Each structure stands twice: as structure tokens, then as C-alpha cells.
Image (tube, grey):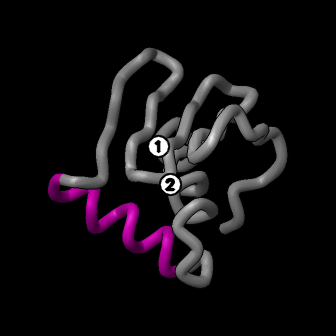
Amino acid sequence: MRPGPGWKHLNGPVWEHESGVRVHIGGLVRLPDMTIVTVNKWPERKEAGYYIKINGGNKKRGLMAWAMNMIGA
């Protein structure tokens, strides 16, 4: 469940996928339709925590994998 190829580093804690998804390592995800999703509320917190856990506790990879799951990639 790694995030996969297609990610590029934009600036500081922000990464963007070629599909248009942006991930801020602080816990924000912007989907291609410009919807903002945060991990600071339930049930998103539980889902993101699951992806972080299966990526060995690496928050960046976990949030990237979670974002890709949200768009169905």
C-alpha cells in the first residue's frame, strides 16, 4: 500500500500527484475537484491513521496512500 509513482515535491510539506491531488503533511488533502479533506475530524482521522500505520508509521507516505484511496486510484 505504498503511494506509488507520480508524486512531486512542491514546497516544504506539500506534495502533488499527477492526478491533481495535493497532500500537506500537516494533515490536509486537496482532491482534484478542489474539495479539502482534513484528518482532524472523525472518521477521516481513523482512516488516515490506518494508512499511516500500514506504511510503517511514515506520515507522508500514509497520507499519500490515503489520498490515492479517496480518489479510487
Distance CA(mark 2)–CA(mark 1): 6 Å
Disc 2 on helix, strand or loop? helix
| Residue at the extreme right | 5
| Residue at the extreme left | 42
Residue marked by disc 1? 70
In the image, 22: left or right of 19? left
Q: Pick the quarter of the image with the N terminus.
A: bottom right
Q: Pick the quarter of the image with the C terminus.
A: top right
Q: What residue type is labelled 2?
A: Trp
- The dot on residue 29 is none
Residue 37 placed where, x, y %?
32, 38
Residue marked by disc 2? 66
Disc 1 on helix, strand or loop? helix
Residue 71 placed where, x, y %?
52, 36
Q: What residue type is labelled 1?
A: Met
| Residue at the extreme top | 33
Residue 4 placed where, x, y %?
77, 53
Q: What residue is rendered at 49% in x and 43% in y? A: 24
In the image, 2: left or right of 52? right
**Count of numbered circles in the view:** 2
Magenta span: chief secondary structure: helix
Q: Mark 1 and mark 2 in contact (Cβ < 8 Å)? A: yes
**In the depicted structure, whether residue 14 falls above or below residue 41:** above
Residue 54 placed where, x, y %?
55, 79
**Residue range of the region highlighted in magenta in the rendering:** 41-53
Q: Is residue 44 magenta?
A: yes
Q: What residue is rendered at 30% in x and 53% in y? A: 39
Q: Residues within 10 Å of mark 2 (few under 14, many from 20)?
A: many
